Image: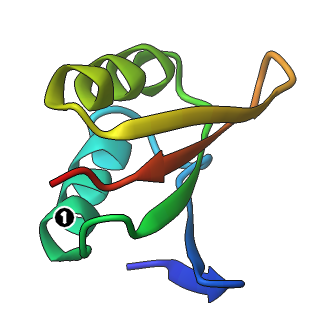
Amino acid sequence: MSFFTEDKVETLDASAWRCPLPLLRMKVWLKTASVGQQLRLCISDAGSRQDIPSYLLRMGHGLTEESDDGHLLILLITKAP
């Protein structure tokens, strides 16, 4: 997987991937992450832009939109208990 860590926040650039791959990779990260750990997720696929925030909110994880230029959406995800 393409995770890298910067300032204790892991980053996954999934902008070149199409749905459902970004969602699946994010779910793998959630399974291995500790509570409170953060992931910066970069996505551009229209399906992922809709599905991932909905999934995270439904599951109770923290979600902050860092940037959205209409093409690239950058989310900061915080793993919930």
Residue shown at 61% from the left, 46% from the top: 15
Q: Nearer the viewer, residue 10 or 21?
A: 10
- Residue 64 in percent (x, y) is at 59, 34
Image: 65 above or below 32: above
Which quarter of the image is occupied by the C terminus? bottom left
- Residue 7 in percent (x, y) is at 71, 84
- What residue did someone put label 1 on? 28
State left or right for residue 31 relative to residue 35. Answer: left
Image: 4 above or below 65: below
Q: Secondary structure at mark 1?
A: helix
Q: Which quarter of the picture shows residue 5?
A: bottom right
Count numbered badges in the picture: 1
Name the residue type under label 1.
Answer: Val
Image: 7 above or below 14: below
Residue shown at 48% from the left, 78% from the top: 2
Which quarter of the image is occupied by the N terminus? bottom left
Image: 20 above or below 70: below
Q: Please name the colour scheme applied to the rendered image.
A: rainbow
State left or right for residue 69 relative to residue 64. Answer: right
Q: Which quarter of the picture shows residue 60?
A: top left
Q: Which quarter of the picture shows residue 67?
A: top right
State left or right for residue 67 relative to residue 37. Answer: right
